[in-house]
Image: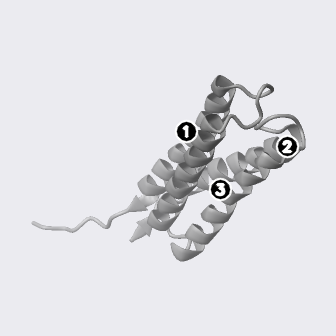
Amino acid sequence: MNINRTTFGLASGAAFVATLMLVWLSLGVGIIGQDGDPANLMYFGVIVVGVIAAFLGRFQPIGMSRALLAMAFTQAVIAAYAIFAKLGYPWSGPLELALLNGFFIAIFGFAAWLFHRSAVEPVSGTA
């Protein structure tokens, strides 16, 4: 399988920036509740899932696509749990949690799509 390096690079950049933003918001500002709320530590599970899945996928485009989908799914599970358990209330309402987490889910999903697109199947020459 050939790799479209430009698309792979864009996907890697999007995933890296989103991960850095997730760390910054979790530690610095706090996505759930106020700054320092221990519920924000759940977001490191997103990163752990991504790292493990990337290693299992051997950093190949399809494996990375699956890793980013796993990260998006983990982010969604954490968001749903935070909303239904009313974590961070009253500082973080359900709309705020849905929007912030939805942003990361969208970026991780977009990066997964880019990784998938970067896998270029060789063209067979049939005449």
Res. 46 mark: 3
Q: Nearer the viewer, residue 32 or 122?
A: 32
- Residue extending farthest left: 127
Quadrant of residue 26 within the rendered picture: top right
Q: Residue at x 80, y 26 (%)?
A: 91
Name the side, left or right, on which 25 lies relative to 73: right
In the rendered image, residue 17, in percent from the top left (x then y), is placed at: 71, 47
Q: Earlier in the sequence, mark 3 or mark 1?
A: 3
Amino acid type shown at disc 1 = Ala
Q: Nearer the viewer, residue 105 or 40?
A: 40
The residue that disc 2 covers is 37
Name the side, left or right, on which 25 lies relative to 56: right
Q: Residue at x 59, y 35 (%)?
A: 102
Q: Quadrant of the N terminus?
A: bottom left
Q: Residues within 10 Å of mark 1 (few under 14, many from 20)?
A: few
Q: Earlier in the sequence, mark 2 or mark 3?
A: 2
Q: Is residue 107 visible?
A: no
Amino acid type shown at disc 3 = Val
State the CA–CA distance, disc 3 to disc 1: 14 Å
In the rendered image, residue 69, in percent from the top left (x then y), is placed at: 50, 54
The residue that disc 1 covers is 106
Res. 93 mark: none
Name the side, left or right, on which 20 lies relative to 126: right
Q: Secondary structure at mark 2?
A: loop
**Mark 3 or mark 1, whichever is nearer to me:** 3
Amino acid type shown at disc 2 = Asp
In the rendered image, residue 117, in percent from the top left (x then y), is placed at: 42, 53
